[in-house]
Amino acid sequence: MNQATPSAAELPVAGDPGERGKLMYDMNETTVFAYAKDPRFSYCLYMPSDMLERDEPPELLVMVHGTGRTFIKYRDALAEFGRWNYCAVLCPLFPVGVLGDGNRDGFKQLREGDIRYDEVLLGMVEEVGAKYGTTFNRFALAGYSGGGQFVNRFTYLHPGRLWASSVGAPGSVTLLDTDRNWWVGVADMQQIFGIGLDLDALRRVPVQLVVGGADRETWEITHSEGGRHWMPGANDAGRTRPDRLATLQRTLLAAGVQAQLDIVPEVAHDGINCLGEMKTFIAASLKKLRAGRAAAAGPLAAQTVNVALNADIRSINPGVNRDDNTDTVMLHLVEGLVALREDGAVGPLLAEKMVMSPDGLTYTFTLRRGVKFHNGMALTSADVLWSWNRYMDPKTDWRCLSEFDGRSGLKVESVTAPNPQTVVMRINKPNALFLDSLARTDCAMAGVIHKDSVNPDGSFKAPIGTGPFTLGEWKRGEYVLLNRFDGYVSPAGKAPDGYLGAKRPMVSAVKFMVIPDPATTKAALLSGAVDAVQLLDSDLLEMSRVPSVEVKTTPTSAKEVLLFQTRDPVLGNPKIRQAIAAALDVRQLTSAASNGLTRPNASAIYASSPFYTETQRQGYKHDLALAKKLLQEAGYKGQKIKLITNKRPGRPSFNIALISQQMMMAVGLNVEVEVLEWATQLDRYNKGNYQMMAFSYSARLDPALSYEQFSGPKDRQPRKVWENPEALALIDQASTISNPAQRSKIFDDLHKRFMADVPMIMLYNYVDITANTKRLQGYTPWVASKPRLWEVKVSK
């Protein structure tokens, strides 16, 4: 175990603000440092910036370059891994020709003239530890190509200094063979280095041997008699790198060393493309290293739950400047009068009960007693009234203002607070979905916040809500920390029921960690650095086989779609949109984009809804001849169509765009794919500034709300896609009646119109694939596709 890191105030440089400032510049990805004891050598680092705030030091991973000396490239490629696994990364540089002879290979043999490269590295490790106020007694060592040779040999000399060893694609290997001399074997290692083989220590080090399956070139690794490193037996381990590593594994296993051989399919000699396997191995080793430490520390050490987000939240202002990740975090902090149940029904949350008047125009909410804000103040009807008035002020820029101010037909005409426990809301006309609209997650449930959430000038400060967690810290681009609200009063219930039911905070903190790279996310889960993640479809099978991980797949009502700007000069022609629909083989597209996990769904209603009728099952037929005929009738002359997408991790938009492009080009459409950052694409969507877009809609459980999500007048709501007046009237009608049979007929009519107008193409409903460590108990996904961290425990 490494020596504990001093607090920021205890660091040797802390007394001098100038020196402390210098140290801060030496965090994260650093510059290149000369090794103080021998400036012929140098190194760069990744040092976690939060180590000054932690009681424990990071672990250390050393990555050794190959002949190409791409040490900075490796550091940059491992920085995210270090960041989310709380691991420092040291990448040394051993230059070519240190002795003036142009020798590129000296470091690989660990000795060159009077230089002992193993001792140089150990000196660098000591220097880095001293610089940052800690001691790295043990570390993980990885290397690729020439660096793999270094790691192979260093592991024999210093196994007691390692907690993991990853040997990547060495051209030459040193076998654990006590009958052969160095470098082919280890028989005379004691005489050469003054260090004997410590088999007991070596058996305690997990060793990975990793190489690309297509790494078959032999010209560079075949030793010829008379060459610099020729010796008898130099080529005996095999012809190719995979052959040589297989032989090395056999000698290690025969000696009782825990050695695994990982072959990366379809990868040639490419260190960066092998890093994924190396990170997975190091993460697993790191998890084992920390497991005993956590057990020894007692139950309180395991009370923070870490959850991976594929992108940062957009703000901490509920329902304002939001996206799905933002909603997820905010709904742990704020609550509304009503909320969604697991089955999509709406029930009281901050309200104890609610009563609708016989004419359907007045709703009376009686508040639950004992509910407190995070600042300790009791919830009253005055707080509900203040929050509602703030949301309805256009200056707030609430996402859902247009849903309640009359622009969408529904208007809240008055909100009053006749006594401290009662709120009365009156609407302009009966609306069966009024409560559903209040419960919408993209509206932050019209979450009630205390007036101290804003500054005296009315600008937003931070959310002071009534939810089970309080806002600890938002470190942009890195994490959002939520702390348990000890004063939380849970709604009634024995278990969670959507956003209702039991909602007790059972852990001391929840940390939503921003990890955009899926490979890093997976490695962080395997190492135990995060407890819950959303997986890519392609990782499902692999992660299902990991004993320490629980994987769940949940169909959701979230939608994967292709949007059209129906006011565009080209796509405003419905025949061109219909031609695109006929050109797409949606079954093939869905299978490819979802890795076969789901089926196409052309309806705005998800397949398990009671309103999903035979009519809703009807989709577009793949018909290339029809597509070409429609394009001809439309007078299409090859005008360019720009299809916007993004590479947001965990969402299939990019793959959908590429596959769709190829299918559309097959019928003569001139389609160009433009990749934008997610925030930029979302801004373009909200402004209606696009021709065509691969997009993901968050979950809506009621069919009328699902249609409303993309339907409306574009002049007042530019983000809307479908503005057919007759369709809007039907959606409005479906929102005002509650009879299921009547609503079902309306939805069937809407689907037929939707298919004819083609304002967008519904492809399929997203399948939520979540994975969590088995120490996390009570973590359950649901159809709304949002993590919930209340009623979740961690095992001891």
Image (spheres, grey):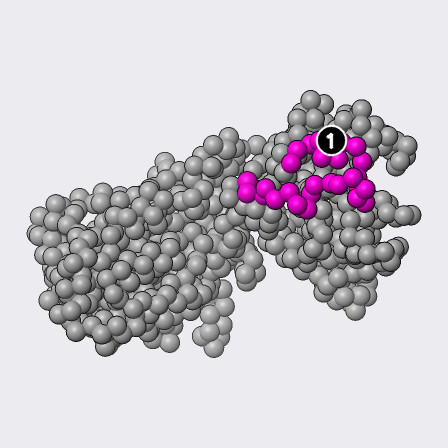
User: Is residue 460 found left or right of 278 in the rendered image?
Assistant: left
Q: Is residue 161 above or below residue 689?
A: above
Q: Which residue is mark 1?
A: 175
Residue 687 inside the magenta-drawn segment:
no
- Residue 285 in sight: no
Image x and y of residue 62, in percent? 71, 47
- Look at the numbered disc 1 and give the secondary structure of its residue: loop
- Residue 40 in sight: yes
Residue 230 inside the magenta-drawn segment:
yes
At label 1, the amino acid type is Leu
Task: Pick the quarter of the image with the N terminus.
Answer: top right
User: Is residue 173 found left or right of 41 in the rendered image?
Assistant: left
Image x and y of residue 313, in percent? 47, 60
Magenta stretch, main secondary structure class: loop
Q: Which residue is more in the foreground, 796 or 141?
A: 141
The outermost residue toward the front is 225
- Point 47% across, 45% down: residue: 533
For residue 789, which quarter of the picture?
top left
Q: Is residue 547 above or below residue 345?
A: above
Which residues lie in the magenta part?
A: 212-239
- Point 76% across, 66% down: residue: 22
User: Is residue 275 found left or right of 256 in the rendered image?
Assistant: left
Q: Is residue 674 above or below residue 56?
A: below
Q: Is residue 274 above or below residue 294?
A: below
Q: Which residue is more in the foreground, 546 or 20?
A: 546
For residue 225, which quarter of the picture?
top right
Query: How many residues crowd around disc 1 within 10 Å: few (fewer than 14), some, or many (20 or more)?
Result: many
Image x and y of residue 782, in percent? 34, 43
- Point 16% across, 74% down: residue: 635
